[in-house]
Amino acid sequence: MNYLHIIGNLTRDPELRTTPNGKTVCSFDLAVRREQKREGQPEADFFRVNAWGSLGEICAKYLAKGRKAAVTGSISLSKREKDGKFYASLEVMAKDVEFLSPKPEGQQEGQKSTDFGTIVEDAELPF
């Protein structure tokens, strides 16, 4: 079973786009702090998160750079080549995203903040 649960901070604002077949996807990068440092290794691991459909639209609307989020989903290794160099990244297909940052200034109506994260009322959800 491929199941991952991570908590981290967004390293940049999420990007919402539509695929050629009309599906929406929101992509964002999450920096997850390591529990213990390994010598010569970064103090965080970086994951590319893709949230599809209505989940992606909600993420694009309420997440921003620096916000903390918990993501649950499956993980895969993505490889690509750019300018003759090979790159690999860990990509997560989000099944659930929980907003963990405190309520920002000017938070929109229909959204509530709790100690556990941010809840969007059903009236705001497109599904």
Image (cartoon, rainbow, N blue to C red):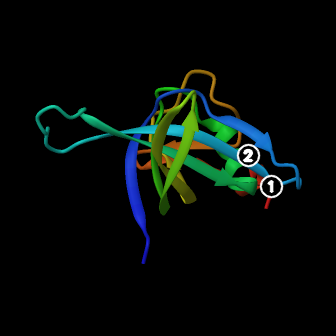
Q: Position of residue 89 (x, y in %)?
A: 46, 45
Q: Which mark is residue 25?
A: none
Name the residue that disc number 1 marks.
126
Specify the farthest residue to the front: 84
Q: Position of residue 51 (x, y in %)?
A: 64, 52
Report the number of discs: 2
The residue shown at (79%, 62%) is: 127
Near-viewer residue (85 or 90): 85
Q: Is residue 49 visible?
A: yes
23 above or below 114? below
Near-viewer residue (86 or 105): 86
Q: Position of residue 60 (x, y in %)?
A: 68, 38
Q: Amino acid at mark 2?
A: Glu
Near-viewer residue (38 or 32): 38
| Mark 2 or mark 1, whichever is nearer to me | 2
The residue shown at (47%, 29%) is: 11
Indicate the secondary structure of the residue bearing disc 1. loop
Specify the farthest residue to the bottom: 1
Q: Amino acid at mark 1?
A: Pro
Image check: 48 left or right of 32?
right
12 above or below 96? above
Is disc 2 surrounded by few (<14), some (14 to 19) or many (20+) residues within 10 Å? some
Name the residue that disc number 2 marks.
57
Q: Is residue 73 visible?
A: no
